[in-house]
Image (tube, rainbow, N blue to C red):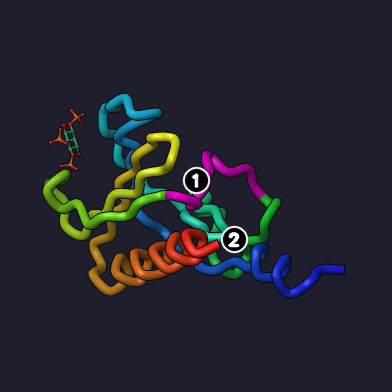
Amino acid sequence: ALNSDTAHQMELEKAGLLNKTKIAEGGRKLRKNWSLSWVVLVGNSLVFFKDPKSQTPSNWKPGNSRPESSVDLRGAQLHWANELSSKKNVFKLRTVTGNEFLLQSETDSLIKEWYKTIQHVIEKLDRE
Ligand code: I3P
């Protein structure tokens, strides 16, 4: 049986569409390539899916489609990074392994919610 901790780990905390580009891999700079991504925050991970059309919030279940990539939030750093793009509402997520992502939305309230929620998970993991 799942204890409450395990259940919490598996909890789907947030999901939605964001513009995403990876800008570094293991500390090495990459060329930007923005694309719309279905982003899911589940447990300690941020999971990215292509094909947003098939991934509406109501039909998303862990395991029902293969993620494009996944980011471990333990030890990650989050910063607003509007200086890194001509787009508005951009933040940068840096993993312990030196992978860097920019995430963006045209909707101010939406990007603020994502920032707050991801930061909350990072801080929770920092305290463990
Ligand atoms: C990039 C593309 C990106 C842009 C980036 C450009 O050109 O226009 O959208 O980032 O700017 O280099 P290309 O398609 O030729 O690779 P932003 O949209 O985030 O501004 P940058 O090089 O100043 O980061």
Q: Is residue 122 visible?
A: yes
Instruction: Look at the numbered disc 1 and give the secondary structure of its residue.
Output: strand
Q: Position of residue 110 (x, y in %)?
A: 32, 70
Quadrant of the image containing the N terminus: bottom right
Q: Position of residue 76 (x, y in %)?
A: 41, 49
Q: Is residue 22 above or below residue 29?
A: below
Q: How many marks?
A: 2
Q: Is residue 109 left or right of residue 99?
A: left
Sequence-wise, the earlier of marks 1 and 2 is 2
Of the residues shown, which amino acid type is indicated by label 1? Answer: Val
**Residues at marks 1 and 2 touching, judged by CB atoms closer than 8 Å:** no
Looking at the rendering, the stretch of residues picked out in magenta corresponds to 65-75
Quadrant of the image containing the C terminus: bottom right
For residue 73: magenta?
yes
Of the residues shown, which amino acid type is indicated by label 2? Answer: Gly
Q: Is residue 48 left or right of residue 111?
A: right
- Tell me the residue at 54%/53% (across/down): 45
Residue 90, numbered label: none
- Tell me the residue at 43%/41% (across/down): 96
Disc 1 designates what residue? 71
Local crowd size for mark 2, using a 10 Å CA cut-off: few (<14), some (14–19), many (≥20): some
Question: Of 118 and 16, which appears nearest the observer?
Answer: 118
For residue 5: magenta?
no
Please state the quadrant of the image where ligand 1 appears. Answer: top left
CA separation, marks 1 and 2?
A: 11 Å
Disc 2 designates what residue? 43
Give the overall secondary structure of the magenta segment. Answer: loop
